[in-house]
């Protein structure tokens, strides 16, 4: 705890804060635009001044206010290279608390400047004559599960990053009204989508992290409020998020559906023009039974969504200290057998590892934070792309 400002020391403190997506600290990563400290007048100085200027305030400051009176003001400006960096608010808060801890008698003010990349604006102008900002060539893939807790959201986020790593332009629409968790998996819970009005229609700007554009019902309502959204209200809100988000160009849009197979799923699926569905299951018997219901629902005549395949999550447990060992704690091969029985493709197995869970808790998808997990997702992504290939860009068709 210091009372005198020392730039070097303050910068070193800010070096301990890392921008999650770039992996660089705020100072060396060029996010710190300015850092200024000004000494504030001491009590005696200000008292003398206030007498001289016959300040309107005649009541002497109380001891308490004197004790808490800041001795200096630190002003920080952070600059983010992206137009709307989803980590801006949480990083600004970290900067404020770090400097307040270091300089207990300072008043710290942090401002955020966004670089204002105009590329995003240009893209959206082209889309404005169409009321839906959903790009024409996008493949919409729903990620579904028979029940909650099987890792559907975790798998969705990692598949999205793995698709982006393969060079595809990817978005996620988090439609899980029962527990929108994509904002916390991507560490951008504080993101508040801005609205841009184009030709009288409001469009929302998605968050963007690790190459993935993200729009979530969780940006607008708290986890418990989302539960209140039922039936037509949820469907119309999700329709709006799908069509009125400025996605830009996308090859794949993954929709993180709510778990289960109820009425809401039927209306959502028919509403969202889904190209195919990926079902996430664990190897457990119960989970597998739920999946059968999910497969039947999707194959139902009224819905008719092609099933791309089944991904088994939590296939085995591998402890960090024994990376070669596999413990089949939920049974072995349950989802693979199920896929065969339902004549659906089996897309891959994802193990349980402490790191996979931790990554989500820390707001960084596992494939980014723990590269050893990449291969599991890559294999699954390659199968998804094979079964549901990217649409061919109009520009590339030549005769
Ligand atoms: P769902 O979307 O199906 O409800 P989540 O993706 O929210 O499930 O996952 C439930 C919990 O399980 C989360 O805490 C998540 O971090 C954890 N989890 C999911 N998949 C794995 C995995 N393969 N290894 C370890 N933890 C996992």
Image: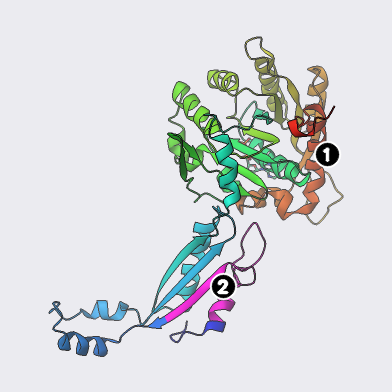
| Residues packed near mark 2 inside 10 Å, few (<14), some (14 to 19) or many (20 plus) | many
* Residue situated in front as seen by the camera: 25 or 3: 25
Discs 2, 1 touching: Cβ within 8 Å = no
Q: Give SS at disc 1.
A: helix
Q: In the displayed image of the protein, which residue is found farthest to the front? A: 399
* Residue situated in front as seen by the camera: 78 or 179: 78
Magenta run includes residue 6: no
Q: Give SS at disc 2.
A: helix
Residue 5 in percent (x, y) is at: 47, 84
**Dot 2 or dot 1, earlier in sequence:** 2
Question: In this picture, is 163 found above or below 345?
Answer: below
Q: Is mark 1 within 8 Å of ligand 1?
A: no
| Residue 88 - label | none
Residue 384 in percent (x, y) is at: 78, 32
Q: On the picture, is 3 further left or further right than 250?
A: left
Marks 2/1: CA–CA distance? 39 Å
Question: In this picture, is 266 found above or below 204?
Answer: above
Q: In the displayed image of the protein, which residue is found farthest to the top? A: 301
Q: Residue at x 20, y 79 (%)?
A: 61
Query: Considering the image in quadrants, where does the C terminus appear?
Result: top right
Q: Residue at x 59, y 59 (%)?
A: 81
Q: Could you say which quadrant of the image residue 272 lies in?
A: top right
Taking the image in four quarters, ligand 1 sits in the one at top right
Q: Is mark 2 within 8 Å of ligand 1?
A: no
| Residues packed near mark 1 inside 10 Å, few (<14), some (14 to 19) or many (20 plus) | some
Residue 310 visible in the displayed image = yes
Q: Which residue is mark 1?
A: 379
Q: Which residue is mark 2?
A: 14
Residue 85 in percent (x, y) is at: 56, 54
Q: In the displayed image of the protein, which residue is found farthest to the right? A: 324
Range drawn in magenta: 9-37
């Amino acid at each position: 705890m210091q009372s005198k400002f020392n730039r070097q020391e303050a910068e070193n403190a800010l070096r301990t804060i890392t921008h999650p997506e770039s992996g660089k600290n705020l100072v060396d990563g060029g996010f710190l635009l300015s850092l200024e400290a000004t000494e504030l007048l001491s009590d005696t100085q200000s008292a003398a001044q206030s007498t001289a200027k016959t300040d309107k305030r005649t009541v002497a400051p109380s001891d308490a206010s004197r004790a808490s009176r800041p001795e200096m003001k630190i002003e920080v400006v952070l600059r983010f290279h992206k137009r709307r960096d989803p980590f801006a608010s949480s990083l600004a808060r970290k900067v404020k608390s770090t400097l307040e801890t270091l300089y207990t008698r300072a008043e710290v003010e942090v401002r955020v400047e966004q670089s204002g990349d105009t590329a995003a604006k240009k893209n959206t102008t082209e889309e404005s004559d169409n009321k839906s900002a959903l790009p024409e060539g996008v493949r919409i893939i729903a990620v579904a599960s028979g029940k909650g807790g099987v890792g559907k959201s975790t798998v969705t986020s990692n598949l999205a990053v793995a698709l982006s790593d393969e060079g595809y332009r990817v978005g996620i629409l988090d439609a899980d009204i029962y527990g929108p968790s994509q904002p916390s998996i991507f560490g951008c819970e504080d993101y508040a989508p801005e609205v841009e009005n184009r030709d009288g229609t409001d469009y929302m700007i998605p968050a963007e992290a690790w190459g993935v554009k993200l729009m979530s019902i969780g940006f607008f309502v708290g986890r418990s409020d989302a539960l209140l959204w039922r039936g037509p209200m949820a469907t119309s809100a999700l329709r709006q998020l799908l069509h009125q988000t400025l996605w830009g160009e996308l090859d794949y849009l993954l929709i993180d559906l709510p778990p289960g197979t109820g009425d809401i799923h039927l209306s959502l699926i028919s509403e969202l023009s889904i190209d195919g569905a990926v079902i996430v299951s664990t190897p457990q018997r119960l989970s597998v039974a739920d999946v059968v219901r999910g497969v039947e629902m999707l194959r139902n005549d009224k819905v008719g969504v092609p099933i791309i395949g089944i991904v088994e999550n939590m296939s085995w447990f591998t402890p960090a200290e024994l990376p070669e060992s596999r413990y089949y704690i939920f049974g072995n091969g349950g989802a693979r057998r199920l896929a065969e029985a339902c004549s659906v493709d089996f897309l891959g197995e994802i193990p349980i590892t402490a790191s996979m869970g931790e990554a989500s808790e820390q707001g960084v998808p596992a494939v980014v934070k723990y590269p050893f997990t990449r291969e599991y997702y890559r294999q699954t992504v390659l199968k998804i792309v094979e079964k549901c290939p990217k649409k061919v860009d109009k520009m590339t068709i030549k005769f």
